[in-house]
Amino acid sequence: MFAFFESMLRPTAVEPEPPAPPGLDTPAALARFYWHFVRQARGLIAALFCAGLLVAALDTLVPVFIGRVVGLLAHHEPAALLREAWPTFAMMAAVLLLARPGAVVLQALISNQALAAGMANLIRWQSHWHVVRQSWTFFQNDFAGRVANRVMQTGPALRESIVNAIGAVWYILVYGSTAVALLLRTDWRLALPMLAWFAAYVALLRYFVPRLRERSRALSEIRSGLTGRIVDSYTNILTVKLFARARDEDAFVRDAVDEHTVAFQAQQRVITRFAASLVSMNACLVTGTGAAALWQWSAGRIGVGAVAMALPLAHQIAQMSGWVAQNVTAIFENVGIVQDGMRSIAVPRQMGDPPGAVPLRVARGAIRFERVRFGYGTARGVLHDVSLDVAAGERVGLVGASGAGKSTLVNLLLRFYAPEGGRILIDGQDIARVAQESLRRQIAVVTQDTSLLHRSIADNIRYGRPEADDAEVVAAARQAEALDFIDGLEDWAGRRGYAAHVGERGVKLSGGQRQRVAIARVILKDAPILILDEATSALDSEVEAAIQDQLERLMRGRTVIAIAHRLSTIARMDRLVVLDHGRVVEQGSHAALLAADGAYARLWRRQSGGFMAEAVA
């Protein structure tokens, strides 16, 4: 039985669609966000709705049964009670022993087995699927911890708000309306305290619910910011310790903790005022209903059975209202979490593929930059009308001072950003019109700031080509001069060699070791276009000399764009392109540029020309 209900909703079974309604702070956007996920489990939600209706209706019968039993006791002799009234008692027993437990179990199976894990993880999975496809800029502008916190919390919050809302709605509508109808049928005066209570309850909700919603949303946003700050400190713990800044990190986090405390206290004040008002109203309801029942009984208008029904009805509504109030509080706490989560999840994808995007087909690997302009949205700009042709199989080095635009040019080629003017073509295909994943599959990159996944050495190397076998992984590591340290690795769990895990961002390895694993990953990827962005900057001279030979072999037959501040590492390129303030000012071979005695020659002389010359020779 459990397995049947648990199999009704598979979180990762369908290809997700982006949940990205426009206008994050509007009720319509919130409703669309909810419906995006609810419609994927609408059958289960409808079943939960029906089960809730059944439970609420059966609960309403309990005070009726109490009144009926008291009435039977008042009108039957003890000896004749069971003989004359056994069918009534049998029906009551069947409802209490079979029907109500069955309805509650059904409600629990739908809520706990089908929806609890299934719907929460469906939302988490689809939210992650959407967020991970956001642009690089999206992640640069936020805390990774806050984004992850929103993805993790939004699923359970959305599910809980729906489940709580279904329960609260049915108890208010079914139980409340049935109770009023029963009292009106017995004597209209008995229903007056309950009608007055319902009017006050509606007014109470209208006053407190908007305040609860707003404070819950603010609290959730502040909590996400606090999580982001804590994760930021942990992620950069080495920097914190190197600069002995633990106390400053305390202050950084303390400010967020204090802000969260104030917001949490503000929310709790509203909840306490709500609870105090409700308790007073409930006391008035029970007292008023009891007084009305005794008054009507004293006047002979109702029997003792009606009194026995009215008092439990009033008491149960008072108890139910407290439960509903807790549900309403939980609903809007969860709605606040969902609204905060929408700030990361329900965001239209930046730099998405254009409609009709086609896969990039690379036959030769020729690259053309046509009058490319870009400036990260600033008026000053970074690149100014850069035109550059890189022939298929040509090795080009980009040279220039920091801020000249070298890395920006590479980031535009990878389509991390879109040019503000001009276009970029590969084999005559405008990269703005191709699928980005197909573009990046054709380009292998080794960066200066190498970041590895918190997985095994083999997994990190195989990231370049997931279908590669173990022999190919070892061959790539050998070419990257990484065998000497991989064989000796052992992690905290006793895993050795290629099975050893490297820690978050590869912290268990030295900079040079991380760089060699990254180079092995690129070797295995075997892409036709190769980008080297300070690829050997983290290596010592002996290892760099060994790897240079492997890089030479790796570059053969590929189109290569290399960036290096140490000019000796790229002096042997076919052509060097010198950038200055976002413009191409010189290009040519190393020897030709030295002979021209221009910008490149000045850079060369600054870097101890005698030593560099020997290295190149």
Image (cartoon, rainbow, N blue to C red):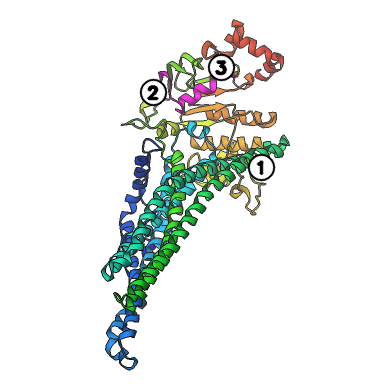
The residues colored magenta run 402-425
The numbered disc on residue 485 is 1
- In the current view of this chain or complex, which residue is farthest to the bottom? 79
Residue located 53% across and 19% down the image: 405
- In the current view of this chain or complex, which residue is farthest to the top? 596
> In the rendered image of this protein, does residue 185 appear above or below residue 333?
below
The numbered disc on residue 427 is 2
Viewport quadrant of the C terminus: top right
**N-term mark: 1 or 2:** 2
> In the rendered image of this protein, does residue 594 appear above or below residue 267?
above
Q: Amino acid at mark 1?
A: Phe
Left or right: residue 464 versus residue 439 is right
Q: Can residue 48 be spotted in the picture?
A: no
Residue 205 location (% of width, % of height): 40, 51
Q: Secondary structure at mark 2?
A: loop
Q: Amino acid at mark 3?
A: Ala
